Image (cartoon, coloured by chain):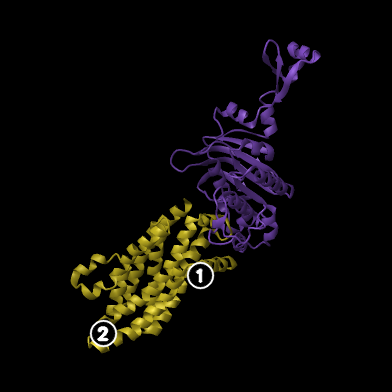
Amino acid sequence: MKKILSSTIQVFRQIKSDPMMFAACFTPFIMGALIKFGIPFLERITEFSLQGYYPIFDLLLSIMAPVLLCFAFAMITLEEIDDKVSRYFSITPLGKAGYLFTRLVVPAIISAVIAFIVLLLFSLEKLSIGMTICLALLGSVQAIIVSLMIITLSGNKLEGMAVTKLSALTLLGIPVPFFVKGIFQYVVCFLPSFWVGKAIQNNGYINLLIALLVASIWFYVLISKLLKKLAG
Amino acid sequence: MIDVKKLYFSYTEKPFVEDVSFHVGRGEIFGFLGPSGAGKSTIQKVLTGLNTKYKGSVKVAGIEIKERTNRFYENIGVDFEFSTCYEKFTARQNLAYFASLYEKQPRSIDELLHMVGLENDGDKKVSDFSKGMRSRLNFIKALIHDPDILFLDEPTSGLDPTNNRLMKDIILAEKKRGKTVIITTHNMFDATELCDQVAFIVAGKVSALDNPHNLIMSRGAAKIQYTYFDNGEKTGECLLDRTVEDMTLKSLIAENRLLSIHSSEPTLNDIFVDITGRTLQ
């Protein structure tokens, strides 16, 4: 436990020393406040209703908090791979599994809590506690996919920034159920975000389970690649 | 302390390390000597648990490597050839962080920094360190938790002669403290000076395994070379244990006509070339 804590604190130390990463951790709260107060304000001054799209804003919130925190952790991990520090952990009592746990699972747990708080504070729709918890958890699951993509597909921090943009595409499944009708929407059924979008659209928990299943396939593929990369 | 029996390892279908067996006792320094790509680092990776898909038996501190847990690393220190420190952080912060990953009481950071001459650089960021400074910091990072077994990959590579000497003295001091040290190197002088046993590794196989002195002596006695003046400068040569048979040398000594005389012992490199037909560099 001491090792896990020490290793997690080390990531936060690194985040603190990087202004961009530091800012990324606070952005969900700023964005949440902007959505919560900005959207109704825009509606009032333009008399244009966005109420039909409130679920999309809530979904964005549920994903943004985990993705940004996991993005910061992923960039730190890339830096550690660059510095060849990551390989060193394999020969310490922390081990490869402990290292991956602190770089992937710990941020996912923290970000699920943050996503839950952000949704409680800033969601536009009245979400049930059950749905809020599910969205926060699935937000963090998708965030792990994003961080795995960043760590696995890029060789350094610069490439990491580019892959971040690419991996953000996996979140494009969110609005599809709202805008694409009929069978064509299933073109993006390989994206967990699509099933999360469907879940909030239909208030259907079964779609959340499908999202989890699809996410597991992504995990399997990406973690296999990551293990090969760390073995280097 | 380390027992390896019939070790086989391969990255592909073709074997990369074949039929390697050796034993290292507690408090010994064991060296792997061989050219780049011979398999030295791969064997070290197997010994440290980084490569576990091996065949045969590899026991370190009584533990079969395939069955090790993370606790195994409480007593293992590894110094990779490349730097494995956080560039953004100071030497002191790096050492404090890595020490926090172990349950054992760490060694004094100030003492370790002083030991490798970095006492005035402890608060400097690693990114501002020279190659030699990084190398020394990397080395003491492996010592921070006072491990019983040390794995050192090219520990003197990139060091100036003063720091090379310093590093070798520290390694010998660690041996005196009872530590078992495994060194991977292609520096024959370091191996001769430091190691109790050396294994020549070529193409993934052990070509010879003995203590450096025995290996050197196996090539035969040292030679004597001398120069003298006889219608111009001339050179003579004879075996050290056959000087009495060299009449020229005998008369030159009697007539006090020698210009120079020196012995030349074979080096570990000569032995390596003799046995393997390869050079170490």
x%, y% of residue A127?
35, 84
Residue pointed to by mark 2 = A51
Which quarter of the image is occupied by the C terminus of chain B? top right
Q: Nearer the viewer, residue B22 or A117?
A: A117
Nearer to the camera, B225 or B256: B256
Q: Secondary structure at mark 1?
A: helix
Q: Is residue B110 above or below residue A127?
A: above
> Does residue B236 lie above or below A229 as drawn?
above
Where residue B15 appears, x then y in whole percent?
A: 48, 38
Q: Is residue A17 left or right of residue B267?
A: left
For disc 1, the marked residue is A16
Which one is earlier in the sequence, the residue at label 1 or at label 2? 1
Q: Nearer the viewer, mark 1 or mark 2?
A: 1
Left or right: where A164 falls relative to B227: left
Q: Quadrant of residue A21?
A: bottom left
The percent position of residue A182, horizontal first and vertical second, equals 18, 72
- Number of marks: 2
Kindly give the residue lying farthest to the front in the view shown.
Answer: B232
Circles 1 and 2: CB distance less than 8 Å? Answer: no
Both labels 1 and 2 in a single chain: yes
Measured along the vertical axis of the image, is residue B29 above or below residue A130?
Answer: above
Q: How many C-alpha atoms fall within 10 Å of the one at disc 2: few (<14), some, or many (≥20)?
A: some
* Chain letter for the part of the structure drawn in yellow: A
Looking at the image, the residue that sits furthest to the right is: B254
Which amino acid, by three-letter code, is at mark 1?
A: Lys
Q: Position of residue B58 (x, y in %)?
A: 59, 45
Q: Establish if A42 lies above or below B141.
A: below
Question: Which chain does tag 2 point to?
Answer: A
In this rendering, does residue B107 appear at all? Answer: no
**Amino acid, disc 2:** Gln
